Image (cartoon, rainbow, N blue to C red):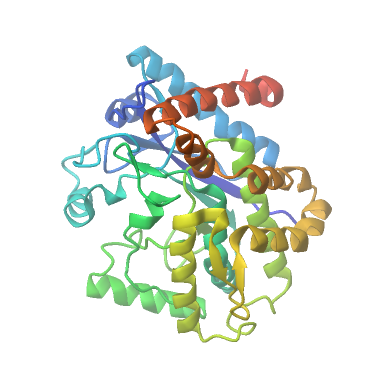
């Protein structure tokens, strides 16, 4: 069994010098398949669910190719990697839709802390109770996916002390989200939040992992991992997704892999432990010291990821996607995007030079993958 997967990708637009420029109102008006975010400086596209990693690779690349062509028609604009306003612009909001009351609420409540770019990974699981079990496990391991994807060490031209500034400042909402013991518990809790006003609508559940579906919280059909920073390299993103899918296949087939029954901690203690792990991952990503949810032992993020990799490799191999999982080794060996940028910064590259190099590298990587792997599909 393989699972259907899809992505929500948010990216900044701007100049080759790294200045982020709000263009989403024009993009959304002129290009199919793009959605606006509350701030006009980033724009979102969504890939259709697919079980095939080959198809997903090209589905990630095709909208970007079309968007790049469109940006060139508007002027000398490009796509900018990273998950925060790396070089400037963090002092004010640029509304994409001034008439939207939900956007009013977001701007007034959170300010530019939500003007971030990220990737949400959706994986299909139709049975709501299995989905809740999967959400429990992945919620506790979500910091590992942040550690692999961190790409926001700069804000307003300076290093921040974070590898993921985005997750360091992002307003998780509501402030406390429990581990849902069942679908009924999830429904009851969401209804209570809507009445209390801690959630403005069913979409206003901003946590690392959430169950998702066409009529939330009642009709649910997928797990949505929301913690990842933007991963610009599609091969790296698919490797992270392959780790997630293999782990999900493991928890689907093994009901004992459930934090409610397989941990020495209470559910409340598990949330506290995971919150600390998320903070550690936002600060030090792969080099973060974490506490394991099963027994509380201290473990480096990269070592925990390597342990899970060993556990799930055979599952990925059996299901035919181990070749997409194996590039994870490269991330563990060479570091995520934030670590590579900080390495350049430590030897004298200023933040603008790091970002402008990343802009060029991102476009070159897209062209390389298109030519090698997607030329016939993208023709």
Residue 110, above or below 96 = below
Residue placed furthest toward the front: 347
Residue 119 shows in the view: yes
- In the image, what residue occupies the spot 47% across and 82% down? 269
Percent coordinates x, y for residue 20 in the rendering: 31, 30
Residue 48 position within the rendered picture, expressed as x and y whole percent measured from the top left: 55, 41
Count of all numbered marks drawn on residues in the image: 0
Please say whether residue 222 is visible from this viewpoint: no
Say above or below: 379 vs 53: above
**Image spot of residue 54 (x, y percent):** 69, 36
> 32 or 293, which is in the foreground?
293
Going 62% across and 85% down the picture, which residue do you hit? 261
- Between 277 and 262, the residue placed more toward the observer is 277
Q: Is residue 264 left or right of residue 225?
A: right
**Residue 183 screen position, x and y as percent:** 50, 75
Q: In this view, does 379 lie to the left or right of 45?
A: right
| Residue at x 31% of width, y 27% of height | 19
Q: Quadrant of the C terminus?
A: top right
Q: In which quarter of the image is the N terminus?
A: bottom right
Look at 38% across and 50% down and name the residue there.
Answer: 166
Answer above or below: position of 179 versus 155. Answer: below
């Amino acid at each position: 069994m393989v699972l259907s997967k899809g992505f929500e990708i948010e990216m900044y637009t701007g100049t080759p010098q790294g200045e982020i420029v709000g263009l989403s109102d024009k993009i959304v008006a002129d290009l199919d398949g793009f959605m606006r975010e509350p701030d006009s400086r980033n724009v979102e596209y969504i890939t259709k669910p697919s079980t095939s990693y080959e198809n997903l690779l090209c589905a990630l690349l095709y909208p970007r190719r079309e968007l790049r062509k469109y940006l060139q028609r508007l002027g000398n604009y490009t796509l900018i990697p990273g998950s925060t306003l790396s070089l400037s612009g963090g002092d004010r909001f640029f509304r994409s839709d001034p008439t939207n009351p939900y956007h009013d609420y977001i701007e007034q409540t959170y300010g530019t802390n939500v003007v971030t770019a990220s990737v949400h990974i959706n994986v299909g699981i139709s049975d709501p109770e299995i989905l809740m079990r999967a959400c429990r496990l992945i919620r506790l391991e979500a910091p590992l996916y942040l550690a692999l994807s961190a790409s926001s060490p700069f804000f307003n031209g300076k290093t921040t002390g974070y590898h993921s500034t985005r997750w360091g400042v992002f307003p998780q909402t509501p402030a406390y989200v429990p581990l849902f013991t069942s679908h009924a518990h999830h429904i009851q809790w969401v209804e209570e939040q809507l009445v209390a006003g801690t959630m403005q609508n069913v979409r206003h559940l901003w946590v690392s992992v959430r169950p998702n579906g066409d009529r939330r919280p009642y009709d649910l059909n997928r797990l949505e991992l929301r913690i990842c920073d933007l991963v610009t390299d599609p091969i790296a993103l698919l490797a992270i997704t392959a780790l997630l899918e293999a782990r999900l296949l493991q928890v689907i087939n093994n009901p004992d892999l459930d934090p409610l029954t397989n941990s020495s901690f209470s559910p409340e203690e598990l949330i506290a432990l995971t919150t600390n792990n998320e903070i550690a991952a936002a600060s030090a990503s792969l080099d973060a010291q974490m506490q394991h949810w099963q027994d509380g032992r201290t473990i480096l993020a990269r070592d925990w990821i390597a342990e899970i990799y060993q556990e799930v490799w055979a599952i990925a191999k059996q299901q035919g996607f181990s070749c997409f999982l194996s590039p994870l080794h490269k991330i563990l060996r060479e570091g995520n995007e934030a670590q590579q940028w900080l390495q350049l910064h430590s030897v004298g590259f200023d933040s603008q030079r790091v970002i402008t190099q990343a802009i060029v590298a991102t476009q070159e990587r897209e062209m390389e993958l298109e030519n090698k792997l997607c030329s016939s599909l993208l023709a």
